[in-house]
Image: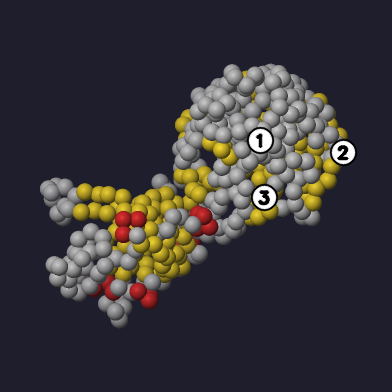
Amino acid sequence: MTMFNNSFFRRILLWTTWLLIPAVWSAVSPDVVAQQGEWASRSEMPTPREKLAACAIEDQIHVVGGAAGENQPGLDTHERYSVQSDSWSMESALPTPRRRPTASVVNGLCYVIGGRPGYNQGALATVEVFDPETGQWASCADMPTARFAHSATVVDEVIYVIGGTPNGSTILDTVEAYNPATDSWETRAPMPTPRAVLATVAVTGQIYAIGGTNAPGAQQFATVERYDPGSDSWSAAPDMTAGRYGMASAVVGEKIYIFGGASGTMAVPLAQVFDPAAGSWFPLPDLQVARTRLAGAVIDQTLFAIGGAESAAPPHPGVSTVEALELENTGFQINAGLNDAWFFPTTSGQGFFITVFPDIRKMFLAWFTYEVNRPPGNVAAMLGEPGHRWLTAFGDYSGDSALLDIEVTSGGVFDSAEPAPTQINGGSIAVSFADCNMGLIEYDIPSVGRTGAIPIQRIAPDNISGCEARLGEP
């Protein structure tokens, strides 16, 4: 390995003394996890409403149905939003007015399914499809189970309708699949956890059923369950960080975005992204306006949060608010070619060893400092004891970023079972990479009240080409 004038690696061997470790991560910056800015306001929807549904077709978003608020009848309103002009226009009215339907896109057509016509009225089994090219609606085969507050998503041009309620009190685990090509329905394996007002999305042919509730004002689920249409079977997936219902959802690339919703009667602005490959949830910037019972859509790399209500408590009037979050795709992917020694030249008395485990989508980081002489025994250590030279961290990565938990270890002797070392969580580290030679460490150790950020680069450029060669790997 290349030697340096500052004898960097030679000094590491003299690590029997202490240099106070400067501190580490502020809570993970959202744009470290998924490079983007903040939610921004767009032109307001002409008709304020909640419990609405939306179809994104090319660069247009068709928003249908909903209600003006509690005790209000379902709407037949159909408004179209143009992303390019940031403007709204009226479209052909929905033939059957309804609140709490779903809307799904197959082959450029918008299918509106279920819902109910008004407050305390029975559920609908009605299915209607809109063709943007002709501007006309047509009727389809009714859904076998009438329901509202359900969710729907598409896999291989088949619409899967999941959960919901027929009457506001009975909560369904029912899964029914609609094939537009044959205008027919098929019953599939029930969802393990019955729930309504949930979100569903599809990634790589798998359907994820997320959150929801089992009755008005009752339990809010953090539960995530995964359905495989090929085997007609369900399995557990990593739960959300907190239970909520009435969220909007979207998929960009192979990541799941969840935003808004409610906990109890309180609307929340929370937005998160779930990476199924890593099995981890990451934070995103909050919505400017907390809303539940809103509609979500995605056009290219931009998420849209449309309408909804600012509270789940009566009378929860609908709003016209529209917000957009632009996601930027850096194209860089963490890979095993990053396994190396890294440092910041301005503070060369410290460094980082980084190891990536692509098979399990994990990263290990060791942060060390060194000095040639051990400090006197009366020196106060900021973290650990005066001879403490290392911090280690381990956690998930996704795309160009990783979120790691710091472990502070004490006790223990090399090559001996006794005394056993002890570990405590010391905070967190967020690591992001701009390319194969430049990265950023963001850190937080709450116990010592230290946060900050350190730009990093490789000690030696030897392995850059190996990293670049792996950029196309999954």
Q: Disc 1 residue type? A: His
Other residues around mark 2 within 10 Å, as few (<14) / some (14–19) / many (≥20): few
Helix, strand or loop at disc 3? strand
The residue under the point 22% across, 72% down is 371
Q: Disc 2 residue type? A: Thr
Q: Disc 3 residue type? A: Glu
| Left or right relative to 464: residue 208 | right
Helix, strand or loop at disc 2? loop
| Left or right relative to 289: residue 95 | right
- Residue 5, by quadrant, is bottom left
Comparing labels 3 and 1, the label whose residue is closer to the camera: 1
Measured from the top left, where is residue 99 in percent x and y? Answer: 72, 29
* In front of the other: 21 or 320: 320
Q: Which residue is mark 3?
A: 323
Q: Is residue 383 visible?
A: yes
Disc 3/disc 1 C-alpha distance (Å): 19 Å
Relative height, residue 301 to residue 454 (above, below): above
Tell me whether circle 3 and circle 1 mark residues in contact (CB < 8 Å): no
| Left or right relative to 136: residue 151 | left
- Residue 17, by quadrant, is bottom left
Comparing labels 1 and 2, the label whose residue is closer to the camera: 1
* In front of the other: 230 or 145: 145
Measured from the top left, where is residue 9 in percent x and y? Answer: 27, 71
* In front of the other: 5 or 193: 193
Disc 1/disc 2 C-alpha distance (Å): 35 Å
The residue under the point 21% across, 48% down is 422
Q: Is residue 230 visible?
A: no
- Residue 22, by quadrant, is bottom left
Number of marks drawn: 3
Of the numbered discs 3 and 2, the one sitting upstream in the chain is 2
Q: Which residue is mark 1?
A: 316
